[in-house]
Every structure is written in C-alpha cells, then in structure tokens.
Amino acid sequence: MNSTKTNHATERHHTRADASDYRVQAWPRLKAVVNPDGTGTLIVNGTHHPCKAASVDALRTGMTARAVTYARTLRRPVRMDVTDGPDAYRLAIRPEGYVQLLSDTGTINLHENLLVSEGPCRRCGHAQPVTLETCSACDVREPFSVKAPTGAERQASPERETVTEVDALAAVGGASTANAHEHLASGASTDTATLRTATLLLAFDAKRSMRVPGRVVLGRNPDPIDGRHPVAAVSPGRELSRTHATIDVDEMSRICVTDLGTLNGVTILDASPRQLIAGEPTLIDSGTRLLFGDVECTITLAFEERP
C-alpha cells in the first residue's frame, strides 16, 4: 500500500510458480481498513488499532510503515489484507520496505525490480523511506505513525514524548524491542507511573524454575539470536538442538514460541499434543508445558515492577 493509491485492486499477477517465487505466510494476520476521511483501522491478529492521518495518502503510508516493522521483526515478508474504499486487495510487505501485490497462490517474486516505499514525516513533512524509525530531518520517533490518540494523549503537550505501542511482533521471532516494552500504568503520569517489564518463568523437568527476560533462545548451547537471552538446558539424549527455539512475549503480554527448524521439533503437551510448525511463531497460554526435543519445560508469564 503505497502513499498514493494504486490499481492493486484490479491488477492480477501471474500464478505460475517458478524458482524465484516465495510463499508469504498467513501469520501474523494483518488487515488494514482505509476510509476516505483519513481514518482507518489496523487489525493485528484480531486486535483493532484505530488510525487517523491528515490525508488518505498519509494513512496508507503509516499503515505500510507499521507493517514494515512487523516484517523487519520477523525478518520475512508479511501479508496484509487491505480494504481501501470500494477496493480490496492483498499485499506482501517486505522488511526492506518493498510492497508487492500477492499472486492468486499467495506468492511474490523476490527478484522483482522494486522501489522502497516512501512517505512524508508526520511532523516536518520530509519525504523518506518507510523503513526509518526516526525522521532523518527532525528526529521525531515513528515519523509515519498514524495511531489515533487516546483522550489522555490529546490533552498532553505535543512536545512531550509519550510511551508508544510496542513493536507488535518484536516478541514473535524477531529483532529490536525486548521485554514487551516498559509501559505506563493506566491513567498515571510519566513522572509517577509504575513501569512493568514482562518476564518468563521456565520450569524444566530436571531443574528448578528460573526467571528470564521476555525474549530468550533455548538450546544446549544457544546463540543469542537478535540479542535474545540464551538459556542452556541439559538434554540427556541430546535431542535438544544447540539452538532449538525462541520464546518471546509480545506487546499484549502473550507468549510466542518458534521452532527454529530443528530435527526433533517442539511439541505442546496438552490434552491433544501437537507439534509446532518449524519457523512459524505460535502463541501459547501461560502455564503451557512443552517438549523441546527431550527437554520438558513449563512456561509461565510473570512481571517485574519498578518505580
């Protein structure tokens, strides 16, 4: 979804698969609703985020920029279903800031010659790529943000920075934001608010529980992928890979586990045990018991509060 309306709704891409075709995963579920008055809604896995911009073009740019943050976090293209006035179409948003129309089979051509999507900063109007997290001209954070302000934010001074929504999938297999971002207690001022940081309690079958940050990577001797906290576990049968899985907490305090393409996989041990799909982030309930190779672990959400 570029800053100016395209004919995406009427274009049709080829459906013939070739070596350069890439199938875009259906998760996370992103939907964008664009209204003619510059308002809209970005829906992320069923959660509605009201949006508002000075123009429809600015709204489209802001929604694209937000989808880019998800793609950068996951380090892969994400799919976004768009309802734009009378038009409806499905896009692939890539970490590099490229926007492509999905084919009928849900694929894109990774080698297509594209330009990075651009738009104006919401404060100074300077045009720049949607991949930037800070305006290159005026240094405002989230220069393409179209998040509709709450009542409290409307009353605040425009020069005072507020705590923004965390990168929605930073905990879902990706980079940048950790610990589900420290956030303000409801109704409290920035001077007196209690900051809460999401953490995890990991209870292994062979050792006592341990409290760890909200972004970890588990294995026999795991690499700290994208800055995650490495957690080494004993694997009696060596069925746990060296770097086996990531465990993260997202901005809505949900736990997400991703199997990193391991031989023995990750299995949810509930009434109907099921194995995770390799490479696909999966949300689990707090207190869920999982099997990582031959290592059992119960994962529970916890919070730390500090003044």
Image (cartoon, rainbow, N blue to C red):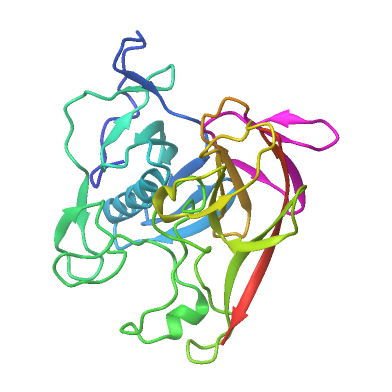
Q: How many marks?
A: 0
Q: Quadrant of the N terminus?
A: top left
Is 19 rendered above or below residue 106?
above
Q: Residue at x 55, y 86 (%)?
A: 193
Q: Is residue 252 visible?
A: yes
Q: Position of residue 52 (x, y in %)?
A: 40, 61
Q: Residue at x 48, y 42 (%)?
A: 31
Q: Residue at x 28, y 55 (%)?
A: 58
Name the quadrant containing residue 271: top right
| Lateral position of residue 74 relative to residue 8, left or right | right
Name the quadrant containing residue 257: top right
Q: Position of residue 125 (x, y in %)?
A: 17, 65
Outermost bottom residue:
191
Question: Is 279 within the magenta?
Answer: yes
Q: Quadrant of the C terminus?
A: bottom right
| Lateral position of residue 192 relative to residue 32, left or right | right
Q: Position of residue 255 (x, y in %)?
A: 63, 52
Between 178 and 70, the one nearer to me in the picture: 178
Q: Which residues are magenta?
A: 265-290
Q: Is residue 35 visible?
A: no
Between 135 and 61, the one nearer to me in the picture: 135
Q: Residue at x 33, y 82 (%)?
A: 158
Is 123 rendered above or below residue 193?
above
Outermost right residue:
271
Q: Position of residue 80 (x, y in %)?
A: 43, 38
| Lateral position of residue 4 relative to residue 53, left or right | left
Between 1 and 222, the one nearer to me in the picture: 222
Question: Is 124 within the magenta?
Answer: no
